[in-house]
Image: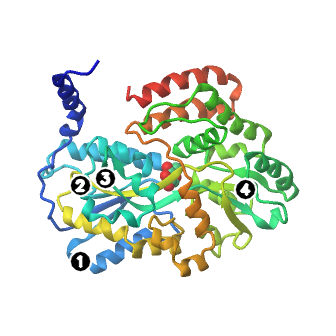
Amino acid sequence: MPRPPWLAALIAALVAAPVAACSLGADVPMDGTGPIYFADGHDTSRGSQIRRLVEEWNRRHPGERVEHVELAESTTDVRAQMMTHAQDAASVDASAALGPVCYDVITVDVVWTAEFARWGHILPLDEDDVDHDAFLRKPIDSGRYGGRLYAVPLRADVGLLYYRKDALGTAPVPRTWEQLRNQARTIAPAHNLQGYVTQLDRYEGFTVNVMESIWDTGGTILGADGEVTGSREGIARGFGRLVQGVREGWIPAKTTDFNEEGTRSEFQDGRALFMRNWTYAYELLSAENSYVAGKFDVARLPTPSALGGWNLAISKCSQHRATALRFLRYLSSEESERVLFSGAGFAPSRKALYEDPALQAAHPHLRIIRDAIEDSRNRGPSPYYHRVSGVFQSNLHDALIRPTDLGPRLDDLTTELHHAAEGR
Ligand code: GLC
């Protein structure tokens, strides 16, 4: 039955209500200039390239100084810090004496962008301010919510398989999970190495690994509108493979405490044959102090990869929005992305850099990154994504080491997943 117009209007008003409640600062002019704060996760890039780009901006724009605030390392912690800060900033008048400073420009993980937009913490951008077509499609689309553009990719990201080419020798690089498992169980011990290390600590990285395994076994999780499409069986199948890997030992149990950096150290110090990690690891592994420099290479993951990456957005609380926009454009410019890729290995989001002959020659894995990004999958275009991810973490993480009671956990997970995706 079609809804009467008054009901449609009431629903629209209720849906918009939380956004309106957070709209302190909606009447701030867009042309304000002056010092701003820029909040990002901890700069783990080789040579602290983000910090250097901010310093360069400050040299060029002394009247519009940017204060760089480095938050936590894990994306889950960064989200929590940014969300709390945005809520605090939204609840007081910007001129309040003891109010929190405004993080004018923030770098939001692709998976949290919808949430920050939905709750009105970031401003929609004027499409004319962004050269949309210059970006790879998936990364720029990850900055959209409700048909509007809220964020511009600073760096794209995708999972890669890092492997020890010295140990693999003439064996083919694994292209399926089964090949990965076989080589991790046979070749790794012959070289006194652990098989496969990846991010299985209890945070977003865990959810990424579980999702990739579910996708690889034919399952799904969320649909294009953030609705649950996954089934208990599909989740059990995908997660079961990780449990099996830990039980068989080729995925070392200590991996259940690893985030990206823990995983990287393990591989970089020469203790593992295979590693799943994001693009940033490449440059660090190639550095002089790395045991595996010259001994490793990268390939596509043997499973589908989640689309990763970080987007730049302007906070609703910003009083110096013209400076914020200029800084956002500077950081996401071709010039900055070139520095970030050649210095730190962060995957560019701009198409032109993938076509650059000098970059292609110096970084032969550029083509692999682009193909992997183009085939990557969106974890969940939903403002409730963090709840969905939390359901995976709370129900499944400790089952990796104690899998005996998996049945009831999967039942709970399936119910909670529907609640989480609906924002209940
Ligand atoms: C990387 C990715 C990000 C992902 C995170 C998971 O930072 O770029 O998208 O959510 O890892 O730990």
Mark 1, secondary structure of its residue: helix
Point out the frontmost of discs 4 and 1: 4
Disc 3, ligand 1: is the CB inside 8 Å? no
Mark 2, secondary structure of its residue: loop
Say the numbered circle drawn on residue 157. none
CA–CA distance between discs 2 and 3? 21 Å
Point out the frontmost of discs 4 and 2: 4
Mark 4, secondary structure of its residue: strand
Badge 2 density bin: few <14, some 14–19, many ≥20, Cα 10 Å: some
Q: Give amino acid for label 2.
A: Val
Q: Give amino acid for label 3.
A: Tyr
- Asked where in the image residue 24 lies, by quadrant, the reply is top left
Mark 3, secondary structure of its residue: loop
Point out the frontmost of discs 2 and 3: 3
Disc 1, ligand 1: is the CB inside 8 Å? no
Q: Residue at x 65, y 73 (%)?
A: 289
Q: Residue at x 46, y 72 (%)?
A: 352
First reached walking from the N terminus: tag 2 or tag 1: 1
Q: Give amino acid for label 4.
A: Phe
- Asked where in the image residue 275 lies, by quadrant, the reply is bottom right
First reached walking from the N terminus: tag 2 or tag 3: 2
First reached walking from the N terminus: tag 1 or tag 3: 1
First reached walking from the N terminus: tag 4 or tag 1: 1
Q: Which residue is mark 2?
A: 101
First reached walking from the N terminus: tag 4 or tag 2: 2
Q: Residue at x 48, y 66 (%)?
A: 348
Q: Which residue is mark 1?
A: 62
Where residue 299 sits: x, y (%)?
Answer: 68, 61
Q: Which residue is mark 4?
A: 274
Point out the frontmost of discs 2 and 1: 1
Where residue 279 sits: x, y (%)?
Answer: 57, 62
